Amino acid sequence: MVFSSLNFIFIFLPLFLFAYYVTPAAFRNNTLFAGSVLFYAIGVIKQPYALFLLMVLTYLNYVFGICLYQIHNSRKKRLFLTKVIFFDFLWLFLFKYSRHLSLPLGISFYTFQLTAYLFDIYYGRILPERDFVTFGTYISMFPKLISGPITPYEMLRRQLHSARRFLPENLAEGMKLFIRGLGLKAILANQFGSLWANVGTIGYESISTPLAWLGIYAYSFQIYFDFYGYSLMAAGLGRMLGFNLPINFKHPYLSTSMTEFWRRWHITLGQWFQTYIYIPLGGNRTGICKWIRNLLVVWILTGIWHGTEFHFILWGFSLFVIVLTEKLLLKKLTDRYALAGHLYMAVLIPLSWMLFGISDPGSIEVYIRKLFPFFSADDAIIYVNDFWKNLNDFRFIIPAGFLFSTRLPVRLLKKIRGSVPEIFVYLAIFWSSVYCIYVGSNDPFLYFRF
């Protein structure tokens, strides 16, 4: 079950919200924990071991946190932490990087939260949670369970222990965020996914250069609106339940450098790597060689987090090279000359996503030759009817992709906030999204596979 499904929107969510709101405030964690377990169980109904693994890891890490706090000898404490972190990541690697086991839904995200919780106890940033239901609610909370955001325990601790009384304004604001995210997913992301699929159906060997470029722009928009849409929906659901969850994106396609882009894209993942990998290695407060090593470790691990296939490693390494080059040479120029920076990123963003989205090394090579046919005359296809056909078929969605990558739609919504036109805008987005889902244009969120 996904947020952008009719069963979730019209059955699960209304029934759960009713149960949640009628539950006395002091017991809402119990309802949320039970509802989240039910939500996950429905999602993994064909993989019952996934639910068992989530529950076991949640309970064991609840115990690990208390035990870790009670160890006062620094050497023993570090050794215990090392063992439990290895234990947690063992399951992630076993399922994620085995070719014979299906990946449990959300395992990458909840593993990062479990390990962050233990690290924070070790460094003295937080005290261990003594109530298992509260801890279980933190880990399994269904708005963020399967694709984030990755939230440190300290961010939600006070909210988990607060009464979280029903407030109509929270419900209203949450519904708005949810509808905006639903629209980005169902109306935009899925359409761009269809365009990218058309490119694959034609075959990379047969497409023209214009269609090759249109294809990687389509994939760039698909992955953005898909994941940004999920992030807004998660934040909206959290708001309905009385939580303030972070939104993972801040208009990343307006960046003037790749360095800035990754401060705006999947923000909570970047913060996790910075807090628990980059800074402990020394960050940028070391010599230049160690600093370069730290950057390399972070970007290679970012690639591996998405998968061990060659193209993910290549993608992570290419981002390392780009970010390092910017920090040493280019970033001052792109910051100073914004137009040049935007043009630079308009080329670099789709190229980077091309490495992410095409899994076969041979296909990557073919696609690059299609993008840059001047390297080989054999790849210069003059026949561009494939481009014009797809451009015509998606003539409304392509400009919408560029428009909704800017701040303009959000600013317009703020201007009509609280007015009658705002109600009609959200109703139009909601029912258009429902229609798209009903006619079969809905697809699972891309990041569920990670």
Image (cartoon, helix red, strand yellow):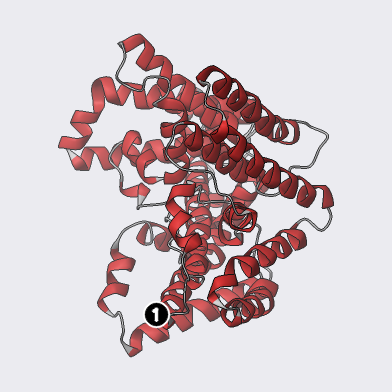
Judge whether 46 appears above or below 367 on screen: below
Q: Residue at x 22, y 38 (%)?
A: 340
Give 421 or 36, whichever is nearer the viewer: 36
Residue 12 can be seen, yes or no? yes
Label 1 crowd (10 A; few <14 / some 14-19 / many >=20): few
- Judged from this view, the residue extending furthest toward the left is 336
Q: Residue at x 26, y 20 (%)?
A: 328
Residue type at the position of mark 1: Glu
Determine whether the residue tagged by mark 1 lies in a helix, strand or loop: helix
Q: Name the image quarter holding the N terminus.
A: bottom right
Horizontal side of 423 relative to 17 (left or right) equals left
- Would you name the residue on which mark 1 appears? 169
Q: Position of residue 147 (x, y in %)?
A: 58, 51
Give 121 or 175, whichever is nearer the viewer: 121
Q: Residue at x 70, y 29 (%)?
A: 90
Q: Position of residue 297 (x, y in %)?
A: 48, 21
Horizontal side of 139 relative to 38 (left or right) equals left
Give 299 or 27, whichever is nearer the viewer: 27
Give 286 or 314, whichever is nearer the viewer: 286
Horizontal side of 268 relative to 23 (left or right) equals left
Q: Position of residue 86 (x, y in %)?
A: 65, 26
Residue 362 can be seen, yes or no? no
- Judged from this view, the residue extending furthest toward the bottom is 420
Q: Residue at x 37, y 19 (%)?
A: 282
Q: Position of residue 434 (x, y in %)?
A: 60, 76
